[in-house]
Structure formats: C-alpha cells, structure tokens
Amino acid sequence: MKLTIEPYHQNNYPLGGILIQGNQPHKWLSEIQAMGLLLENIIAYPIPATTPNSVWGCFLMVNLEKYKVDIRLNTFVQVINQVLYLPEKTTLYPSLSKHDIDKLFLDKPAILHPAFGLVELSEPINWFELVISPTQKATHCRRPADAVFIPKRISSFQIMPTSVEETLQQLEEKIFPQQKNFEDQPLNVFEKTKLLLYKQLFDKKAKITETESADYQEKPLFSLFKSVLNIFSKKESEITESMKEDFASLEKRNQKYLDKLLEMFQNNLEEALKYAIPLDEGTSRGSNSIRGADFSMRWSNFSLFGNNDSSVGGSTFFDNDGYFKLQKEYAEAAQKLIQQKQYHKAAFIFMKLLKNPFQAAKTLEDGGLYKDAASIYLKYVKDKNKAAICYEKGNMTVDAIELYKELNQNEKVGDLYVSINRQKEGFVYYQKVVDEYKNSYQYVKASLLYKNKMFDVESGQALLLDGWRNQRDAFNCLNNYLNNIHQDSTRWQELVSVYKEDVSPQNHDIFLNVLKYEFERDGEFSEGIRDMAYEVITKQLKTNPSVVSELRTYNKKDKQLVKDTMRYKLNVVK
C-alpha cells in the first residue's frame, strides 16, 4: 500500500502543531517569541533535510485549542490519532484506521511531508543545551558511518497471511482448562434403554401447574405389553404403576442435566460452554427420540475446528421444548459475547454448537478478525467472494487478488495490483475488462476505465467515436466524447469534424440532441452551433415535419416562433 498525502481544500483532521522552515536554531527561537509562545508550553523537534547532516526546520507540538496563535508565515500541522502529523489542507491516502496507525507507528509520533518524507519524532530539542554555549572541550573527530538508505515514500503496505490450514491449526491451539464431568451421575446404558422403552409405552400429560404431579397415559403399544405381562404375572396393575414411577424418576434424572446446563448459562457462561451439546444430528428431540447426545464436559478449548469433543458419560434426550430452549440459550450467549467483543468464543458457538459456519465467519469478520473469517468462508462456507473481501479488508492483498482472479473479477484485480504499486500487472487486467466492454458494445464504460484508471484519455476517446459511428449508445458516446474536451475551440473543431464526416440521415436526430447540450453551454461558439442545428433541422423537414419544434430550443425568447411552428405543422397536415 502506497502511503501518501494529497492536497485538500480544507483541514481534514484536528490541528496539532506548527512547522517552521529554516536551519538556524536562533531563528526558530525568534519565531517562537514572535508568535507569543513560551518554551515551557511547547515540545519542539528538529526536522532533518534530505541530505546528510543537514536540517530542514523545526516542528512545534502545541495545543492550538488552548493557545490562540498568530503563526505569521509559518504553517499549521494536522494530527491523526495523536501519532501521525500532516501539513495543513492535506489528506492521507489511503486513509488508515486507528488500529492500522498504532500498528504501523507503535505509538511513536511521526510527521509526513512532501519536502522531507516521513520522519520519526524521537528526541525533542533541549533548548538549555542549544541556547547556552557549553564549555568547549578538545574532541577527536571521527568520520561517521555511511547513512542508511531511507526510501522517500512507501510504495505499498501488505499483510502476508498464513495458509488456510495453518490458520485453522492456530485456532485449534487455543487451549482452555482440562476436561471434567458433572458430579451427578448420568444415566447408565441400562437406564437409558429403560427410558427409551418407557417413551414407547407411555405418554406424559402436560402439567397445568408446577405443583401438580405428572400424569402418564398409556400408549396403544402398552396394551400389547399388558397382554404379554398377564401370561406371566397377575399383578399387572402394580407392575404398571411401578413402571410409571420408574419412568418419572428416570425422566427427572435425565432432565436434571438440561436444567443444570441452562442454569450454568445464566450464572457462568464460559463454564457452561465447556459442557455445551451441539444441536445437530447427534442431539435427539421429540417424544420418540432414539439417538442421544453425550452430556459431560465436551470442550477442552473453544477452537472452531477439529474434533475436540468428549464421549465420556451417559446420554440425554430432549423433547422439542428442551431442544428449542437450548437453541435459544446458545443464540443469546453468542450475542452476549459479541457485545463483550469476544468474537472467537461467539464464533465457536455458531460453528460448533449451532452448526452455522456462515454466521461464525460473519462474526469474526465484524470483529475485524479477517484472516480467521476468510479461512471459514473458504473451507466451510465455500464462498470465495466473501473470503476475498476479508483478505482485502485485512490488507492481505496478494491472497485477495488470487481469489478475485478465480472469480473473474478483473477490474477488482487491477485495482488491487495498482494499490500495491504493481501498475503493469494492474493494467493487464484493466485491458481485459475493456475488451469485455468492447465485445458487448459498452463503449462508454470502456472509455471511463481508460480515462479514470489507465490514464489513457486518447484510447478512451477513440472508443467513444467508434460507438458513435457504429450507433451503439450513440448519444452517450458522442456526448461523453465532447465533454472530455475542455477547451472550447478544440471542442468546436471536433464537433464540426463529426458533423462533416460522421452525420448521416440515420443519426440526424441523435446528433440534434447532442447539439442541444452543446448549445446550453452558452460558450463563444453558440452561434455556430445554432446555425449547425438549423441545417440539421432543414434536412429533416421533408421526412419529419415535427422536427420544426426543435427551433424553440435555440430561440427561447422568441414567443412568435411558437405560433409559427404550430402554423407550419398544421399546414403540413392539411
């Protein structure tokens, strides 16, 4: 990324200092005194010139909101995030976020100026040592080492990301506390089987109040079971009641785990996530559920990928109500973590628990974790366009370029190449876009790309003339062609040339519409344009009498002309 400053019509940032040009310290002091500033109220830095062992001037860091200063012939300086200083009435291009500036300059102030480049403000001036002559001592002069070459400008700024696989592996290695289980014993295999059998034989009637005891109704399958039971025992009613009580006990123990998990989500969110159950094919719901989900501490860490869940413990069954309660709790927990800016943990919930990789990637993207978001978009969402956007936002330009190439977004590829000072490669892809526009006869779009991005106005003008001659969006092509000529005399000459060589009965009416726009410029050639329009109108009168109405465009103050044109058209009709 090329970091430059460009002229701007006003100050775009707060003022943060004053710049004094000159290489003599006693003149700096004179200017400071003339501006009414006290040395104790300012911090001054020397500014080196572009040649070794020379000084360009002096920068005064002063609170201009507190002190109203007449800066005389000196210049104001703007400040960005109290770190980067720019001359007045300029703007930074490209603009950087606070995070980018902090990362680039490491909280060390610097000044960027076209006269001397980028200078770190490392050591302020000690006026006492500078003004008062020290006691002279005999010294031995030594030749300084050769200066280190410092580029005059930054051509590009990029972040080189690791591969998708390395990124995912790094996310896996975010280790959290070791695994542990709930103290309560879950259902064992035998109890789980009994619970499943009871769900086939009985149907639990919903309670009206919390104090009301549960009522279990017998399902049709239980009739067959009783007929078999009567063969072996005459205590059918006692056995039935015992089964219902056992069913209620097992359900209560089973439900206790869900209740405890929901309670943990309210009291200790991070701890609850370690026991969380993914809501996918491994979690059963409904009254006739067969499959279950292990219920113990499942996550040793909050990494987003890989198989880090545990299979220790029994199983739990969810009815629809329990399933949706847990789903709601996960969603609310994710939103709470997003508000706390814990984007990785929120993404963990979307990715692992709610099985929503797109929302996980979007959460990371919204949190500025572009590299991680791009990895999920690529591997799990299969969305190269979203991944490319993340790479672009994160200044991982080379990776973004490769994805945009695969997506055939050639203009975007060109833009990114140019942004990293690889103009030659960028123009190759711009030319591909131009060729596509030409093949689809979109001459105006092709010319704008030539003009605005390839800085080749001549080729753009040639395309617009081709569009006019081939009658492909002819009006816009000729209108844009003339608008691109800023000098009135040159534009008039081109208009005359087009009229003589490229105007025919097939495009008379379009050319007349172009003349309207040229006439409204009210330039020195308005009379010539009016005469040209009269000729075009006269040539069309025999085949198109209504064209006489166009005369009003060139004679708006002539009220009699309206009556004359109406009279002419009536006579033609008669």
Image (cartoon, rainbow, N blue to C red):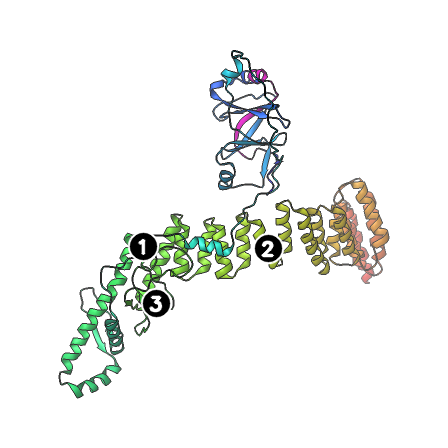
Please name the residue that numbered disc 2 is placed on.
402
Q: Earlier in the sequence, mark 3 or mark 2?
A: 3
- Name the side, left or right, on which 505 lies relative to 12: right
Q: How far apart are marks 1 and 2 (CA)?
A: 40 Å
Q: Which amino acid does label 3 sit on?
A: Thr
Residue stretch rendered in magenta on the structure: 11-30
Q: Which of marks 1 and 2 is nearer the N terminus?
A: 1
Residue 347 locus on image (x, y percent) = 41, 55
Residue 225 among magenta residues? no
Q: Residue placed at 47% from the left, 24% from the top? A: 66
Q: How crowded is mark 2: few (under 14 residues within 10 Å), some or many (20 or more)?
A: few
Q: Residue 283 carries which label?
A: 3
Which SS class for mark 2?
Answer: helix
Q: How far apart are marks 1 and 3 (CA)?
A: 24 Å
User: Between 468 and 313, which is closer to the camera in this rendering?
Assistant: 313
Residue 22 among magenta residues? yes
**Picture quarter containing residue 408?**
bottom right
- Name the side, left or right, on which 452 lies relative to 65: right
Please name the residue that numbered disc 1 is placed on.
178
Q: What residue type is labelled 2?
A: Glu
Residue 298 locus on image (x, y percent) = 33, 60
Q: In which quarter of the image is the C terminus?
A: bottom right
User: Between 213 and 154, which is closer to the camera in this rendering?
Assistant: 154
- Name the side, left or right, on which 246 lies relative to 62: left
Which mark is nearer the camera, 3 or 2? 2
Q: How crowded is mark 1: few (under 14 residues within 10 Å), some or many (20 or more)?
A: few
Which mark is nearer the camera, 1 or 2? 1
**Picture quarter containing residue 541?**
bottom right
Q: In which quarter of the image is the N terminus?
A: top right
**Picture quarter containing residue 169?**
bottom left
